[in-house]
Amino acid sequence: METIDPNKPIVNVTGHNQAESRSKVKKGEFDAIFRQAVDSTEVNRPKTESAPFLSDIRPTQFSSEPLPSEHMLVDRAQRLIDTMGAYQQKLIDSGATLKDIQTLVEKMATESESLSAASNAVEGQKRLKTIVDQSLTIASVEIAKFNSGHYNDG
């Protein structure tokens, strides 16, 4: 086993000082050196081939949201009705603050917008459409009442 003498200086392994080998750059010269380095490099760009039969390819159609189904419409209506039920319970609760109720009002507004957009796309379900329209009407009335200050103590 070899011991290290703490009084002996450590020899530089590379043999020269890296700080001395670097050239000093004057202020403003970096830009010129950088541009020279960029201009001197050659970029090999891959060759591109054109597609000769582009007209034979059918375009794809993307839909950001799938078309709503009857089941989706029922689920959205149920969520809105459940939120309105929670809203009704908060109005009855004497310990509920307007801030507590406001979160439910915002949720009702979001769910109403979602349900309204979905109900416009579904056709032919007259009974379901009636329930959805009534739910949207009640929700919009309650949202308007809350936002107008109907429930403010005063």
Image (tube, grey):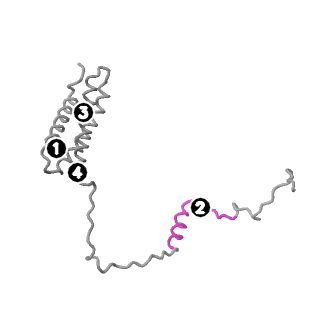
Question: For mark 4, does the 10 Å Cα neighbourhood hold few (<14), some (14 to 19), or many (20 or more) residues?
Answer: some
* Residue range of the region highlighted in magenta in the rendering: 21-39
Decide whether residue 36 is among the magenta residues: yes
Q: Which residue is mark 3?
A: 84
Looking at the rendered image, the disc whose residue lies closer to the viewer, 1 or 2, is: 1
- Amino acid at pointer 4: Ser
Residue 126 image offset from top left, x and y in percent = 12, 45
Q: Earlier in the sequence, mark 2 or mark 3?
A: 2
Q: Reply above or below: 62 against 94.
A: below
Please tell me whether mark 2 sits on a helix, a strand or a loop: loop
- Numbered-mark total: 4
* Cα–Cα gap, marks 2 and 3: 72 Å
Q: Earlier in the sequence, mark 2 or mark 4?
A: 2
Residue 43 image offset from top left, x and y in percent = 48, 74
Q: Earlier in the sequence, mark 1 or mark 3?
A: 3
The reply to whether dot 3 and dot 4 touch (C-beta < 8 Å) is: no
* Cα–Cα gap, marks 2 and 4: 71 Å
* Cα–Cα gap, marks 4 and 1: 12 Å
- Amino acid at pointer 1: Leu
Residue 99 image offset from top left, x and y in percent = 31, 28
Looking at the rendered image, the disc whose residue lies closer to the viewer, 2 or 4, is: 4
Q: Which residue is mark 4?
A: 69
Please tell me whether mark 3 sits on a helix, a strand or a loop: helix
Residue 72 image offset from top left, x and y in percent = 25, 47
Decide whether residue 140 is among the magenta residues: no
Looking at the rendered image, the disc whose residue lies closer to the viewer, 1 or 3, is: 1
* Cα–Cα gap, marks 1 and 3: 18 Å
Q: Which residue is mark 1?
A: 128
The mark found on residue 26 in the picture is 2
